[in-house]
C-alpha cells in the first residue's frame, strides 16, 4: 500500500512540475495575446495533469502463453530476499512526506487564522462586505465557502468615493472569478509538495496573475478612470493586504500592474479565444500525464483484475507461495496439491511490490512449468500433472 501511494505521489509530483514549467513559459505570451484573465485558465493545467495520474492507465492485453514474459515499469521481479529494505525505505520516505505535508497544512491554517484575527472582521453588512476593526490593512477578500470582502475601519476616510468604487470592483472580481478557490487549491499543492520550490514560485505567479486580471476587470468597467486607479495602486492601497486563502508574504510587483493599465483593453473575443485555447492546453496536459503512465497488463480471456499487489513471504513452500499470491490477487487455484510434488520443501522467499496480480502469478508459475502443466481461464488456474 505504501509503495503504491508513494508511486502515485511521485508521478503527481513529476506531472505537476512539468505542467508548472510549461505554464510559466507560456504565461507572458498568453497575457500579451489574450489578456491576463486567460492566463488564469492556463493555470488549470497544473491540477489537471496531477489529477490525471489518479485515472488508471491504458491496458495491454497479453495471451496466457506470453504472460511469462510480461514486464512492467511498476512490477518487481521474483526474487529471493532483498525486498525488506526496499519496503522499509519506501515506508520511511512516505512517512517523511506525509509528516511534512501535515506540518505545512498546519502552518497554512495557523497563518490564515492569525491573519483573520488581525483583521477582526465584523458581520457582513450587505453584499458580503464587512468592516475590520483594524486600519492596518487595505481591502481584502477572505474565505472559501463563505467569501466576503473585509474593508479597513477607516475605509470611508482613507479613500474618495470614486476610489472606493474602484476598490470594491477589484475585490468583487476576485470573488466572481473564483480566485479564492484557486488559492485554496494552490495552498493544497504547497502542502502536498512542500519540498518542491516550483509550487511556491507558481503560487506567487498565480497570485500576481489574479491581481492583473482584477486590474483589467476594473479598467474594462471604468476605462475613463485609468489615471485614478493607477494613483490608487501607487499609493499602496489595493496591495496593502494580500488576497489569498492564507496570506502570502511579500509585496506584489507594482510596476507590471501599472504598465498593464496603459495597455489597450483586450476585446471579449480575444479573451474568449484565449480561455478556450487555455482549456485545450489544460486538457492536453491531463491527457499527456495520463498517457505517460505505465501500461496495465491484463491476461487475455481471463477477466482477472490487473490491480497492483504488494506482498512478501519467506521460507514458504511453492504451493503456499502460489496460493498466497492467488488469494491476494483474487484468483482461484485448482489442484494446488500437485505443486508439492513439483517443488517440495520450504525454501521459497518472494516479494512483489506494486505488481499486477496476473503478472505476479505468471512469475510464480515459471518455477513449476517444467514439472507441472497448468491452464489459465476466466475461472482461475488449474494445475495438471505432466504426462
Image: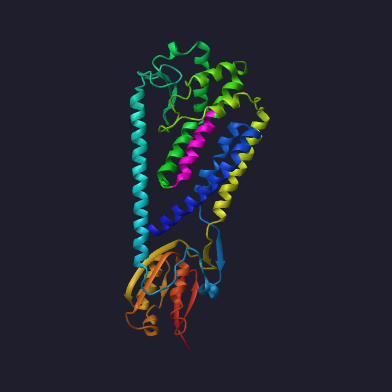
Indicate whether 147 appears above or below 331.
above
Residue 325 in sight from this viewpoint = yes
Residue 329 located left or right of residue 38: left
- Pinpoint residue 206: horizontal percent, then vertical percent: 51, 36
Per the image, is 147 magenta?
no
Report the front residue among 251 and 186: 251
Indicate whether 16 appears above or below 162.
below
Q: Residue at x 36, y 41 (%)?
A: 105
Quarter location, residue 223: top right
| Main secondary structure type of the part rendered in magenta | helix
- Pinpoint residue 80: horizontal percent, then vertical percent: 38, 75
Per the image, is 208 magenta?
yes
Q: How many marks?
A: 0
Residue range of the region highlighted in magenta in the rendering: 196-211
Quarter occupied by the N terminus: bottom left
Q: Residue at x 44, y 47 (%)?
A: 196
| Residue sticking out furthest to the bottom | 387
Report the front residue among 248 and 45: 248
Amino acid at each position: 500500500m505504501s509503495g503504491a501511494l508513494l508511486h502515485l505521489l511521485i508521478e503527481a509530483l513529476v506531472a505537476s512540475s512539468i505542467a508548472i514549467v510549461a505554464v510559466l513559459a507560456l504565461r507572458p505570451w498568453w497575457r500579451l495575446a489574450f489578456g491576463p484573465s486567460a492566463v488564469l485558465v492556463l493555470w488549470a493545467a497544473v491540477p489537471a495533469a496531477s489529477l490525471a495520474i489518479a485515472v488508471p492507465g491504458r491496458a495491454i492485453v497479453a495471451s496466457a502463453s506470453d504472460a511469462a514474459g510480461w514486464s512492467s515499469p511498476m512490477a518487481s521481479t521474483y526474487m529471493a530476499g532483498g525486498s525488506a529494505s526496499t519496503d522499509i525505505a519506501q515506508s520511511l520516505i512516505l512517512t517523511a512526506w506525509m509528516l511534512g505535508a501535515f506540518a505545512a497544512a498546519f502552518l497554512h491554517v495557523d497563518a490564515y487564522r492569525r491573519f483573520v484575527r488581525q483583521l477582526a472582521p465584523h458581520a457582513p453588512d450587505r453584499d458580503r462586505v464587512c468592516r475590520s476593526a483594524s486600519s492596518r490593512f487595505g481591502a481584502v477578500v477572505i474565505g472559501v465557502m463563505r467569501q466576503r470582502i473585509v474593508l479597513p475601519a477607516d475605509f470611508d476616510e482613507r479613500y474618495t468615493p470614486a476610489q472606493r468604487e474602484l476598490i470594491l470592483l477589484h475585490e468583487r472580481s476576485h470573488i466572481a472569478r473564483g480566485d479564492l478557490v484557486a488559492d485554496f487549491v494552490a495552498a493544497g499543492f504547497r502542502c502536498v509538495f512542500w519540498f518542491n520550490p516550483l509550487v511556491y514560485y507558481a503560487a506567487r505567479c498565480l497570485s500576481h496573475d489574479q491581481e492583473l486580471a482584477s486590474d483589467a476587470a476594473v479598467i474594462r468597467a471604468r476605462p475613463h478612470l485609468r489615471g485614478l486607479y493607477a494613483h490608487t495602486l501607487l499609493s499602496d492601497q489595493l496591495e496593502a493586504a494580500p488576497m489569498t486563502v492564507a496570506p502570502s508574504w511579500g509585496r506584489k510587483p507594482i510596476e507590471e500592474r501599472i504598465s498593464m493599465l496603459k495597455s489597450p483593453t483586450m476585446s471579449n473575443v480575444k479573451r474568449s479565444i484565449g480561455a478556450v485555447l487555455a482549456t485545450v492546453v489544460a486538457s492536453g496536459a491531463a491527457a499527456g500525464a495520463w498517457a505517460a503512465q505505465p501500461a496495465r497488463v491484463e491476461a487475455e480471456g481471463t477477466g482477472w483484475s490487473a490491480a497492483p499487489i504488494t506482498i512478501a513471504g519467506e521460507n514458504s513452500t511453492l504451493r503456499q507461495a502460489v496460493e498466497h499470491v492467488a488469494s491476494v490477487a483474487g484468483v482461484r487455484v485448482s489442484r494446488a496439491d500437485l505443486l508439492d510434488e513439483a517443488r517440495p520443501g520450504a525454501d521459497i522467499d518472494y516479494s512483489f511490490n506494486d505488481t499486477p496480480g496476473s503478472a505476479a502469478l505468471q512469475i510464480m508459475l515459471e518455477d513449476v512449468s517444467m514439472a507441472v502443466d497448468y491452464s489459465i481461464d476466466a475461472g482461475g488456474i488449474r494445475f495438471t500433472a505432466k504426462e
